[in-house]
Amino acid sequence: MDDNKIFLSEKEIPKAWYNIQPDLPAPLLPPLNPKTGKPIGPEDLAPIFPMEIIKQEVSQERWIEIPDEVMDVYKIWRPTPLHRAVHLEKALGTPARIYYKNESVSPPGSHKPNTAVAQAYYNKMEGTKRICTETGAGQWGSALSFACNLFGLECTVYMVKVSYEQKPYRKSLMHVWGAEVHPSPTNLTNAGKSFLEKDPNTPGSLGMAISEAVEDAATHDDAKYSLGSVLNHVLLHQTIMGLEIKKQLEIAGDKADVIVGCVGGGSNFAGFSFPFVKDKLAGEDIEIIAIEPTSCPTLTKGMYRYDFGDVAQMTPLLKMYTLGHNFVPSPIHAGGLRYHGDAPLLCLLVNKGVISARAYHQNPTFEAALLFAKTEGIIPAPETAHAIKGAIDEAMKCKETGEEKCITIGFSGHGHFDLSAYDNYLAGNLEDYTYPKEKIEEALAELPDYEASLK
Ligand SMILES: Cc1ncc(COP(=O)(O)O)c(C=O)c1O
């Protein structure tokens, strides 16, 4: 192969998303109603999601066609390039071939608009006027603001307070695209008021911001809620990335041995990897590695059980690896991978051993990000840096063994709005923090065993 960047034409953008549900190695347990503890039906979700999204959430169709209106918007930045990281390979002295799928070229700078655009479209079709959401570091909020703006919808974003203060420029992006942004917890919702009563100085968390956004949507008829990760339909929309990678590796005359990605709630990881999980389940030998921060070790240390998605216990219970829904991440951590749970689809595949998981501290992660920036030029988002660290470790193993593996990184986004985290790393101000197992056990001790009550 001669080219270091593999492009597809707009005609080659996949026409359908891949739904992994019919191919799972075990049945996915249903979400449970937070009040009754019983499996929920479409009518429970109707106040907060449009019906088409609810259908996708439970669909057993393997392929779901991408609507033309969504495709038209995708073409603003898709297909995204697959790069061969030749300069990184050279710096490492590895015989491995390293590729990265570059989602940083989207207007908001990450993979998040792949689902934001689809969700905004389905909402528009069903008459929604305003979409409410939460955001951590601001990538999701900016992606949804971008998408709502294109479909003429209003957008209200509850942004975790510590990020609102530390990352003012993502907020500016949301304002440019016309969204209203509030530092969460706020005094605007009952959930927000109750969090502030308990701790007026709380830095906030994704779990709290979700409670606020869900309450806002559920109490206003013309508003709906949108989630940027975790749920099945979000993961579905993201599979466009992995489907493109498969075509691009084929053009490069290569075949995936290792896929590495970072996990916050699991959406980019699933999007990059599920089309390869399909092949692995059909017998192909592919290693699929999920990377998370040691300070939020959901997959590596969490318990696999039903838990709420938010602090106020308003969302359905999901069967997932969890650190407990009261988890408040340490504010010293730089990245956005700080959700207490993970996508049920991803958790099931980790539980069945199809996907492996690993956790890294943030200092070695930033070290890897700097090496990437100095060799390949792009400054990765702190979340993406976890995937890069994982890929570098795999490439260094190849250096020891002499194996010439093909390693693909899910490059989920750039770090242009995260430069304060890079400043802190360069100044030696980032602390490595291991989340203690006891805290997880403590957080979950009070929670009833919902699965037992299902039997
Ligand atoms: C660039 C980037 N990568 C990864 C993530 C993690 O989210 P997810 O696991 O849903 O992809 C985020 C979350 O905001 C992000 O902004």
Image (cartoon, helix red, strand yellow):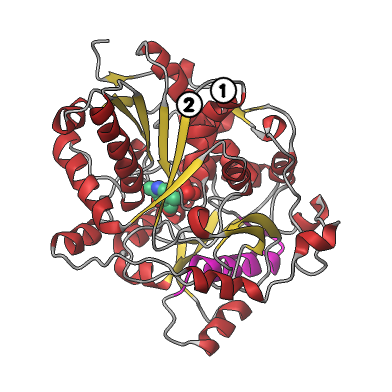
Q: Is residue 384 above or below residue 218?
A: above
Query: Measured from the top left, where is residue 253 in percent x and y?
Result: 37, 10
Q: Amino acid at mark 1?
A: Asp
Identify the image quadrant of residue 124. top right
Q: In the picture provided, is 2 more to the left or to the right than 246?
A: left
Identify the image quadrant of residue 444. bottom right
The magenta stretch is 204-225
Residue 286, label in figure: 2
Name the residue furthest front: 401
| Tag 2 secondary structure | loop
Q: Residue at x 37, y 29 (%)?
A: 408
Asked if the magenta segment contains residue 128, the reply would be: no
Q: Which residue is mark 1?
A: 279
Pointer 2 with pointer 1, Cβ within 8 A: yes
Q: Amino acid at mark 2?
A: Ile
Q: Is residue 95 above or below residue 315?
A: above
Asked if the magenta segment contains residue 220, the reply would be: yes
Asked whether the viewer can see residue 33, the reply is: no
Q: Is residue 327 above or below residue 175?
A: below
Q: Could you say which is closer to the camera, residue 76 or residue 360?
A: 360
Q: Residue at x 31, y 52 (%)?
A: 382
Query: Measured from the top left, where is residue 368 in percent x and y?
Result: 23, 46
Quarter occupied by the C terminus: bottom right
Query: Measured from the top left, where is residue 182 in percent x and y?
Result: 46, 70
